[in-house]
Amino acid sequence: MKKVSFLMFTMLSLLLILAGCGKDKEVSTTGKEEGSEGKTLRIVTDANYAPFEFLEGDKVVGFDVDFITAVAKEAGYEPKVESIGWDPIFVEIEEKRADVAVSAITVNDKRKQTYDFSVPYFLSTNKILVPEKSNIKSGSELKGKVIAVQTGTTGQAAVEKLIGENNKNIKKFENNNLAIQELLQGGAAAVVADNTVVEEYVKNNPDQKLKVVEDSKAFKEEFYGLMFPKGSELKAEFDKAVNAVYENGKYAEIYKEWFGTDPDMETLKA
Ligand code: ARG
């Protein structure tokens, strides 16, 4: 008799434990606080912007990918980065079909009207990519030349400011690699895009015989930010997480991996 009740007791406890486990699992997938396994976020990008985001096979890699992964994990989320193209990023975030965008996106007043941004995470400026033998030495010398840009970027806006908004000499492309191809094929005299991207391109493609021209008067300093739907609760959580990866050295580690030098943390905190 004693043996039987003991057996029943063990079986009952086992059942209770199992039931408990199942319940735990259910909760942990629905909310980030409840489990170790955080909620999966849909993070969108345009993977045509090395070294920030580019495709290696069908995998999206780059500084931005490592950065957002560290930040999302810090905030308790599971990041899922998807390359959907530049223009669609803005649609998906505005329509709240994606949680975060990371794509070397410059924070500016115009975009702030429609989107929320994190604290800045990278300092950038536009520069001019030209053939080595080009005599273009400044922004103002872009006048009368055919310029290739990626549509809807600060590069396009900067060129429009220099040579006029409706200037037919501005050739617009869906992504920056296509703009560079146009330059290589002789269809444009220059590409205007973010300094790190054009500098990296020149470094990695010495056979193409290109160079980068800077003009700090024509092109202002810009800061990249993570982009959220307006009013997203994630902004505050991610700001906290960005500051945490600044403090704990993770940002510097990722930066060094991609750029080979230490980041200037002071410019980011300014
Ligand atoms: N920083 C520039 C902008 O925000 C260009 C960014 C382009 N990024 C990209 N992944 N294609 O307009």
Image (spheres, rainbow, N blue to C red):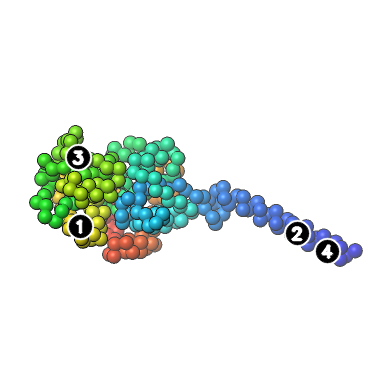
Alpha carbon distance from label 2 to label 3: 73 Å
Q: Residue 6: give its label.
A: 4
Where is mark 3, residue-wise?
A: 170
Cβ atoms at labels 2 and 3 below 8 Å apart: no
Coordinates of residue 223 in the picture (x, y in percent): 28, 49
**Residue at image location 70% in from the left, 56% down from the top:** 18
Q: Under tag 1, what secondary structure?
A: helix
Alpha carbon distance from label 4 to label 1: 80 Å
Q: For marks 1 and 2, give the one nearer the viewer.
A: 1
Mark 3 or 4 closer to N-term? 4
Q: Amino acid at mark 3?
A: Ile
Alpha carbon distance from label 3 to label 1: 22 Å
Mark 4 or 1 closer to N-term? 4
Coordinates of residue 44 in the picture (x, y in percent): 40, 47
- Look at the picture and state if 85 lies above or below 204: above
Where is mark 1, residue-wise?
A: 208
Q: Between residue 112 and residue 44, name the one nearer to us.
A: 44
Q: Residue 13: give its label.
A: 2
The answer, for residue 192, to whether it is visible in the render is no
Q: Between residue 93 and residue 167, name the one nearer to us.
A: 167
Alpha carbon distance from label 4 to label 2: 11 Å
**Figure quadrant of the N terminus:** bottom right
Q: Amino acid at mark 4?
A: Phe
